[in-house]
Image: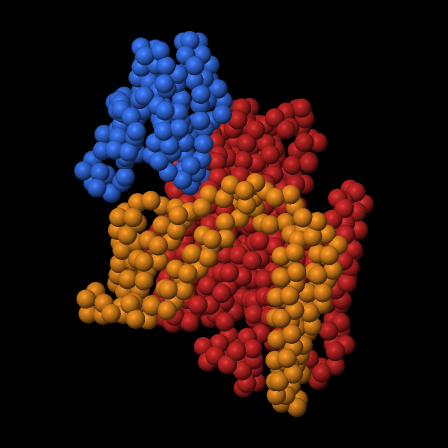
Amino acid sequence: MTIVVAYSPDEYGRAALRAGADEARVRDEDLVLLNATRGDALVDPRFASDEHIVEVQDALQEQGLTAHVRHEVVPDIAAALVDVAREVGASRVVVGVRHRSPVGKALLGSVAQRVILDAPCAVLAVKP
Amino acid sequence: MEMLLEGFGTALTPTNLLYAVLGVLLGTAVGVLPGIGPAMTVALLLPVTYNVSPSSALILFAGIYYGGMYGGSTTSILLNTPGESSSVITALEGNKMAKAGRAAQALATAAIGSFVAGTIGTVLLVVLAPRVADVVVTLGAPSYFALMALALFAVTAVLGASKLRGFISLFLGLAIALVGTTTGQPRLTFGRPELADGIDVVVVAVAIFAIGEALWVAAHLRRRPLEVIPVGQPWMNREDWSRSWKPWLRGTAYGFPFGALPAGGAETPTLLSYITEKKLSKRPEEFGKGAIEGVAGPEAANNASAAGTLMSLLAIGLPTTATATIILLAMQSYGIQPGPQLFDAEPELVWGLLASLFVANTLLLVVNLPLAPVWARLLQIPRPYLYAGILFFASLGAYSVNFDAFDLGLLLVFGLLGLTMRRFGLPVLPLIIGVILGPRLETTLAEALAISQGDLSTLVGEPVAVVVYIVMALLLVGSIVGPRLRRTAPAHEDEEEKVDVR
Amino acid sequence: MTTTNDTPTQARPQVDRAQYGLSGFLAVVGAYVVIEAVGLAPGFADQSVQPDAFPYVVGTALLVLSVLLAVATARGDVAEAEGGEDVDLGQGSDWITVAKLTGVFLVAVVTIAWLGWAIVGAFLFAASARILGSRRLVLDVIVGIALALLTWYGFYVGLGIPIPAGILDGVL
């Protein structure tokens, strides 16, 4: 079985990764990190650089964890997460969640929310 | 001199100052934003400014022009995506500097260099333009016809990679310009009464620049995001200053004359400046790894050439860059006839504009140095909103010309033409200049031949005209032979040039 | 909806066939200009440049250029599509999105006289954003309506240009 982590190079992604790594150790499972972007802006700060991905991988390896990183441009991030979870037969999906104002909730779709509803397995939502 | 002071009187009224600030901010923003440039912005704003006073509108546009140059260099340095050909060279060293953790210094030398070059360039413009205008105004129609032909030829054949495509674009533009009414009968109107007054150039410009670009991006929507180099407040230390000031001055010296020539553009002077700095540098080994001289020189050249461009626009009435072309269009839509008479006919407007260039330049430095991190955030705007916004404002602009759905249809047709041109690598500038200069070419020729009563030899009957035609011939020969001497061209390019010899 | 076009850049064919299409287009335009020139009545006898003079020159030039382009294409000349800050030519072109946008635009052209700018503008923005890949329908529509109303009132109040309101006449 596998733990899928929604990763981004910010506090939410790091929180998710910490929680995911803990889970992986406790349950003795592999990790799959998904760092995806919709690729619809010239710059996306939540899309990690290649060097950063290598660093993250190295760090996980040092902790004795096996981790695959998927670093992709996808049309829809929540759907991509759910797909990856199905594909690898995930036991857990870990996502970081942020505080959102009522207006934000009304207007913006939340990746975490859609993953929680659509995922084929348990979802762990962590706060930084 | 007192004219200039009066100009400052015009430029520094609260309203116009506001327009200058607005222009500078807007210009920098669109310079930074991907896919939008100053030419497109000014085109989009044309309809909006019909009801604003001409001097305010021109002050706004000048701010956008200068701001756009600055914004373009910001993205070259931070992202290595030169939006315009004039900032290609800046990206060479600028992006290397940024990667080496010296983004702040690269931005600072670009900004201060632009200010220095822009100011010197504007001084030269103020001193020289009226004198040049005095000379040009004495020229007869044959000489003026020759100058126009030179401008068209230069933009078409000298700039840009393929001469064949340049000419295709130019003649498409001239064909569009033929539409309208001539000696009481409709010409090329497809029987539509809406076309009797000709195709509105504003609609063509908005369509080609804005719709064409938006559709072209729509065809290439997704891509891996680029890595932006985080930046703080731009600053320079003493060493950076001492390494920068000479390149600024030399870059200015290259940029202004090239900009002022009808064939100039910013590519050549920025490249020359880069080569010079590399040669003169005490640390040539730093070039290619982020040498500050390689940012300072070309950036200065780039801005000085912008000032030079305004010289041929104001003193001769011939535009040589996309933005200058649209500014000329703006003048025409206000009923102002650009050309050498401008200084006598519209002194308040011209001197107000010149003074506002100084203001815009200063504002750029004051406003933009602290704002660099804010500008970098603009890059995160999602494409759907950016380009939906462009389509929205383009439609609004075209519709508000006459409130006629027909104009929206034209906008779509020419937008698709703009898309096709981008797909086939046809340069946009010759088409736009062709549309704008086409009618003037026809009237000037008619004027010249009316005086000579139809004798064609009058066209070479003035010394200036003869000189201009010789220059054109030399340019043609030079642009064909030059590249062959310098490098063995890749096979297909070589072939293209053979075909071009006409 | 938005198709991610994942086809890798096809190996460039030796001959860029689409360019023959461009060449044909130039020929049609050139021929039309020349035919139109033939049909023009002469101006005044003493007019130095007759109305058909420029059309002849431009039309002929377009015909010549069309032939030159065809020849160059046959010899293997390949169009260098325009790159740009926001265009990555490394991936194939997605013409479906362009076609959809064109459709939206046509709808706007047809309906604007009836519905007025406020409605058509909002539709234009929201639909374009959707086609271009935005997934937040509610937000798109709200932004579209806000933009359309703001520009309508901005033109009316700020610039004194009354844009026809269409069926909303009297409501706005």
Q: Quadrant of residue C125?
A: bottom left
Q: Is residue A100 left or right of residue B223?
A: left
Q: Nearer the viewer, residue B281 or C131?
A: C131
Colouring convention used in this rendered image of the protein: by chain
The orange chain is: C
Q: Is residue B114 left or right of residue B145?
A: left
Percent x, y of residue B239: 55, 24
In the rendered image, the vertical position of residue A111 relative to residue B17, given as above or below: above
Q: Nearer the viewer, residue A60 or C30?
A: A60
Residue B233 appears in view = no
Residue found at x 49% / y 22%:
A51
Q: Is residue B71 left or right of residue B281?
A: left
Percent x, y of residue B82: 55, 41
Percent x, y of residue B14: 33, 53
In the rendered image, the vertical position of residue C59 relative to residue B450, given as above or below: above
Q: Is residue C49 left or right of residue B296?
A: right
Question: What is the display colour for chain B?
Answer: red
Residue found at x 52% / y 45%:
C87
The blue chain is: A
Q: Nearer the viewer, residue B496 or B147?
A: B496
In the rendered image, the vertical position of residue B124 relative to residue B240, given as above or below: below
Quarter placement of the C terminus of chain B: bottom right
Residue found at x 63% / y 25%:
B286
Percent x, y of residue B162: 68, 53
Q: Quadrant of residue B269?
A: top right
Residue found at x 50% / y 49%:
C94
Residue C103 appears in view = yes
In the rendered image, the vertical position of residue B455 relative to residue B217, given as above or below: below
How many numbered markers are drawn?
0
